[in-house]
Amino acid sequence: MNYEKLSRGLRYYYDKNIIRKTAGKRYVYRFVCNLQGLLGYEPGELHAMLDIKGFHESFKT
């Protein structure tokens, strides 16, 4: 991937509000995801419905 393709992709995601620049950090972007707006559930509700354990809980014995 060259610089032109990378910058074009970043501009596209930034213009479509898919990513947002992280304040105070250089070259750091954060994905913007409104899960409740997309699916109608908050992340905790969705995890409970699908019986998904958190990352740290999966290592407990």
Image (spheres, helix red, strand yellow):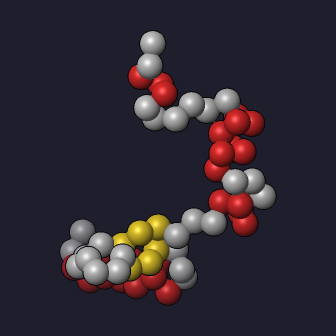
Q: Quadrant of residue 60?
A: top left
In the displayed structure, 43 sits above or below 17; it is above
Work out whether residue 5 can be spotted.
no
Q: Quadrant of residue 34?
A: bottom right
Foreground residue among 59 and 4:
59
Number of marks in the image?
A: 0
Q: Is residue 2 left or right of residue 31?
A: left
What's the residue at 26%, 77% (across, down)?
Answer: 25
- Which residue occupies the extreme top position in the image? 61
In the displayed structure, 42 sits above or below 38; it is above
Foreground residue among 31 and 11:
31
In the displayed structure, 37 sits above or below 61; it is below
Work out whether residue 14 can be spotted.
yes
What's the residue at 47%, 25% (across, down)?
Answer: 58
Q: Is residue 40 left or right of residue 14?
A: right
* Residue 49, position as x, y percentages in the image: 74, 36
In the displayed structure, 43 sits above or below 53; it is below
Q: Is residue 16 left or right of residue 36?
A: left
What's the residue at 65%, 60% (across, down)?
Answer: 35
What's the residue at 23%, 79% (across, down)?
Answer: 26
For the C terminus, the image quarter is top left
* Residue 39, position as x, y percentages in the image: 74, 57
Q: Is residue 10 left or right of residue 42?
A: left
Foreground residue among 31 and 48:
48
* Residue 16, position as x, y percentages in the image: 54, 82
